[in-house]
Image (spheres, grey):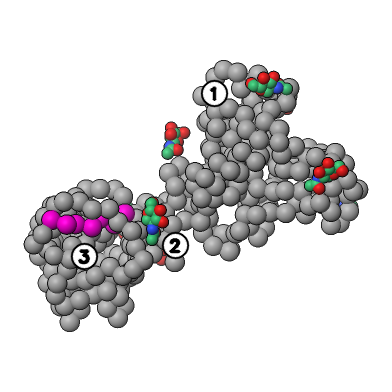
Amino acid sequence: MFLITFLLIFLSVCDETTPDIQKMVIIFGVPQTPNNYSTQVLSFDSCVNYCLNSDSCMAVYMADVTGTDCQVFEIGQLYTVKEEESGGKVAMKMNSTSTVCPLTAEENSLTTGTTINQYNITSSGGIWTFKSILCPTNFTVFQRPAGIWCMGVIPTGTPISQQTGSSLCSSTYGGVLSGLQTVDEYNYVISVVQPYLAQLTGILLKYNTLGFWVNGNRKPSCNKTVTSATCNGTNEFTFSDPLLTAYDGYIWGVGQPSGIAAGDSNCIHFGFNSSTHESMGVDDYKCTETNTTAAAFIGYVCGVRPTNSL
Ligand SMILES: *[C@@H]1O[C@H](CO)[C@@H](O)[C@H](O)[C@H]1NC(C)=O
Ligand SMILES: *[C@@H]1O[C@H](CO)[C@@H](O)[C@H](O)[C@H]1NC(C)=O
Ligand SMILES: *[C@@H]1O[C@H](CO)[C@@H](O)[C@H](O)[C@H]1NC(C)=O
Ligand SMILES: *[C@@H]1O[C@H](CO)[C@@H](O)[C@H](O)[C@H]1NC(C)=O
Ligand SMILES: *[C@@H]1O[C@H](CO)[C@@H](O)[C@H](O)[C@H]1NC(C)=O
Ligand SMILES: *[C@@H]1O[C@H](CO)[C@@H](O)[C@H](O)[C@H]1NC(C)=O
Ligand SMILES: *[C@@H]1O[C@H](CO)[C@@H](O)[C@H](O)[C@H]1NC(C)=O
Ligand SMILES: *[C@@H]1O[C@H](CO)[C@@H](O)[C@H](O)[C@H]1NC(C)=O
């Protein structure tokens, strides 16, 4: 029954489509909770077109297809749809390069989206499942062994303490200061900071070093002790980044971390030379410091789990 419904409706929709990559596939069905959506006052056909033309729209649903109450699901807002034999309809945006209607569901690509905000749709036993990776704007997705992680480098424009960076990351994005799991993550921070520094003008350039706070707090047991096997490099710190399982991206600056004897260099920033924009590696620094004569901390690296990753 599913296949017949799917093909019939798909055929009728295909008739109207241009050779675009994205197509709307329509089934009888009902979104299952929990989910989230916005509403549009549109006829069903108009709502389907609205979704097709909106980059962030993944699917639309109308319980009464003769009405104008259309639920719009953005990427990450829909998890599952239960297929029905009649009643409300769900229109899903899919990626299909085919200019003719595929004869079977298998011939139709059920993957769509960009690298960062993408989703896959699969169907099994009358349940359509949407797997999405949705990161905040300007964040980049990293596949870590412990799960998928979104990382963003957030310049604040004015100097901030580590606590402020941590609070902003939490209040703005629901995240924590990101750790640096891999060299790729370290290089990602560089790739965002360098163009930012290149266009920076004004008072911040008077500081030789400009830093961005990253995850890490010194262990009390590694405070005021001599370096030992258990207090040596990243193991001097605890990390609250929940998906951090390796520390290869903590590439220390020359002679760093050096705060084991200082008593108050309990946080970690990622420093850049303000004139050459070169990475200076990571460095332990006083958590409450916003700026010294030589350095200013002008942003933070925030990490958050993607929305609706299954
Ligand atoms: C729906 O979206 C709102 C606003 O973005 C959010 O606060 C809420 O947690 C979401 N609900 C669900 C079930 O995802
Ligand atoms: C759509 O699918 C085609 C072929 O499978 C692929 O080359 C293209 O990158 C996909 N487009 C998007 C936006 O995912
Ligand atoms: C979608 O499927 C492709 C190929 O299997 C996979 O590489 C990608 O990570 C999947 N995306 C999501 C959001 O699950
Ligand atoms: C994303 O980054 C660009 C370039 O740095 C910036 O202009 C824009 O405001 C950022 N958008 C958000 C939502 O942070
Ligand atoms: C930044 O680079 C310049 C030029 O190589 C160098 O003179 C300066 O000492 C560097 N600043 C820091 C803080 O390392
Ligand atoms: C480290 O020791 C110094 C001096 O004893 C103290 O002021 C500071 O609060 C300690 N920091 C931690 C994280 O225990
Ligand atoms: C600290 O780590 C470095 C590099 O891994 C190593 O060479 C050194 O022996 C360690 N020091 C102590 C006291 O364990
Ligand atoms: C830090 O910045 C503040 C505000 O711009 C400034 O008043 C203060 O002098 C700066 N501190 C140092 C040590 O440069």
Give the structural element (helix, strand or loop) at label 1: loop
Residue in the picture at 55% in, 41% down: 168
Residue in the picture at 53% in, 38% down: 154
The Cα atoms of the two marked residues, 3 and 2, are separated by 21 Å
Percent of width and height locating residue 121: 32, 66
Q: Residues within 10 Å of mark 2 (few under 14, many from 20)?
A: some
Residue in the picture at 69% in, 24% down: 208
Q: Is mark 1 within 8 Å of ligand 4?
A: no
Q: Residues within 10 Å of mark 3 (few under 14, many from 20)?
A: many
Q: Which one is earlier in the sequence, the residue at label 2 or at label 1?
A: 1
Classify residue 187 as left or right of residue 281: left
Give the structural element (helix, strand or loop) at label 2: loop
Residue marked by disc 3: 90
Classify residue 114 as left or right of residue 220: left
Q: Is mark 2 within 8 Å of ligand 3?
A: yes
Q: Which residues are magenta?
A: 68-74
For badge 1, the amino acid type reads Leu
Percent of width and height locating residue 118: 38, 56
Query: Viewer-proximal residue, 232 or 302?
Result: 302
Query: Viewer-proximal residue, 170 or 25?
Result: 170
Question: Vertically, is 205 above or below 305?
Answer: above
Q: Main secondary structure of the magenta part?
A: strand
Quarter of the figure with residue 274: top right
The Cα atoms of the two marked residues, 3 and 1, are separated by 47 Å
Percent of width and height locating residue 192: 53, 37
For badge 2, the amino acid type reads Ser
The Cα atoms of the two marked residues, 2 and 1, are separated by 36 Å
For badge 3, the amino acid type reads Val
Residue marked by disc 1: 200
Residue marked by disc 2: 309
